[in-house]
Amino acid sequence: MSETAKKQKNSKEKAALAVVPKESGKMNSYKENIHKMVKNLKNKEGLLGSDEIMDIMLEKGFTSEEEIARAFSKEYEVEFIENLVDYQISEDVLKIISRKTCEKYTIIPLIKMEKTLVVAFADPSDMHIRDTLSLMTDLKIQPVVATKGAIKKMFNKYFDRQKEVDSLFYDLDMVMSVEAQDDNVIDLNKKQKKSDPVIVFVNLVFSDAVYLGASDIHIEPYEKTIRIRYRVDGLLHEKHVLPKETAGALISRVKVISNMDISEKRKPQDARLKVFFEKKEINMRVSTLPTVSGEKIVLRILDDSAVKKGISSLGMEEEQKKLFLDTLHQPQGMVLMTGPTGSGKTTTIYSGLVKVNTPDCNISTVEDPVEFRIHGINQIQVNHKVGLDFSAALRSFLRQDPDVILVGEIRDLETAEIAYKASATGHMVLSTLHTNDTVSTVGRLLNMGVPSYSVAENTSLIIAQRLLRRVCVRCRQKAEITDQILMEAGVSEEDLDLYSGKVYEKGKGCKDCDGLGYKGRVAIYEMLPITGNIKKCLFAGVSQLELKSVAIQKDGLKTLRQSALLKLQAGLVSIDEVIRGTLGDDGV
């Protein structure tokens, strides 16, 4: 800093200090009416910066930035945000006000509600700034107060990552050098050369997905942009939008490290990829699909941590876990898992296989694709090109002396017939179907052509499964819901007291849950053992509605909705998740 600049700065500080009384009694009165202090400071020539004002206030009596912020909050009657760093801001909101403007005025936009933009200010006293922001954004500005330090931490949290992404593509015309790494393995712990921005960015996408707990990464080209989304706790969230010019290099990079044919862009391709991140090995299933705007890539992240933890980590109630394990240890029979794609069927069924995977048990599986590779289990990948489908593999299994057989999915009558034949001849068979609940699985098998006597005599257990989002423990809030809503959801009048004070809403959003209000998922189960009562119904050819009524009233079937209500009672899920994720039990 030049001598002239230093003199000007000292002059400004002296002028400002002249308006701040030195006596402690008067200082307290200024704290009570901070408006006068700020007005006096700002009336001095050259002292219009909020940073300078707050530095002087700290020097002359205020003990902390938080004390200044709380004083601003009280004087200007605006909310003080105590834990600003826990707030999660969407990319759309961040784009409303430029980074340059945010840094200039020490502000950051938090949320947009229709025509109102909530903005955190370190210094809310300047109406001129509010008016300027309102003109710039064409929105009503609602100020809140936060400390200067907290706002600057938000700059680091949000702007630096976007700056890192932007800097990777500073020259779209540069020639990218993308080389395959051995054995489809990517080590995200190793730093990449700065000359390879595409490599750095792809690794950044992978590490972000793992950090957020995403189950899928979607790389989607459009006419003018390429969009990257993550599926977190069952819902997709947009994270990056890049110029279309980057699409070719990004897609080629993913295809190269997956050992795909980068020259083939007209046909879908499938592959696998292994990633190491913070001492954790993560497998990914990679799929490409030609679209009118280019190749779309979806990477399914196969996290086998839940499988390794075992059945106890799945979220089954004790009686459900006992029923599942007892059935698996039977010498023969059929266990069917049902639910939509992404409902956790594979994790549950593999947790069961791990439990029976002992040296005296021969386990064989046929899957499309093989998602989790488990030592001690003979796993077969379906290969339609050579005629190795589910039915062909099953025929071969029966000559391989298996004890337990897993059929990835029963898709047709031929596979169903062979599977049921195996279950009737001394084998425990596990498989999956895509149906809504346990009872509709019975209807699906019958409609497929499996005889009712075979379903009745050889099916041991049918399990329906769903995944509900957990309410974030860190930012959850007590729910104010009426008894009427609970009863409409399926809670009996005599059980209402069990839910009193235990029900939570989605959280406000914090750093731990990435601002979503939910963190992780919990499984709910409906288990239908084929009892004598169910067999009688099958032989009598009753309707699905009658079958479900018998299962509930005579065998005590706990439906998906009832299982979800138990999670609600335990404070794990919200009433909205219960209603969204399950169907009611009306009419039974």
Image (spheres, rainbow, N blue to C red):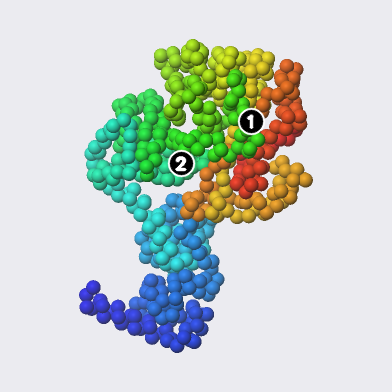
**Residue 167: x, y in percent?**
30, 49
Q: Secondary structure at mark 1?
A: helix
The quadrant the C terminus occupies is top right
Write the residue at 49% across / 87% down: 25
Q: How many numbered marks have been drawn onto this rendered protein structure?
A: 2
Residue carrying label 1: 323
- Point out the frontmost of discs 1 and 2: 1
**Compared to 119, does 282 lie above or below?**
above
The quadrant the N terminus occupies is bottom left
For the question of whether residue 341 can be seen, the reply is no
**Compared to 323, does 276 lie above or below?**
below
The amino acid beneath tag 1 is Leu
Real-space Cα distance between discs 1 and 2?
A: 31 Å
Write the residue at 65% across / 38% down: 563
Residue carrying label 2: 214
Front residue of 101/470: it is: 470
Write the residue at 44% across / 15% down: 388
| First along the sequence among labels 1 and 2 | 2
Q: Secondary structure at mark 2?
A: strand
The amino acid beneath tag 2 is Ala
Write the residue at 39% across / 59% down: 155
**Residue 190: x, y in percent?**
29, 43
**Residue 402: x, y in percent?**
51, 17
For the question of whether residue 124 can be seen, the reply is yes
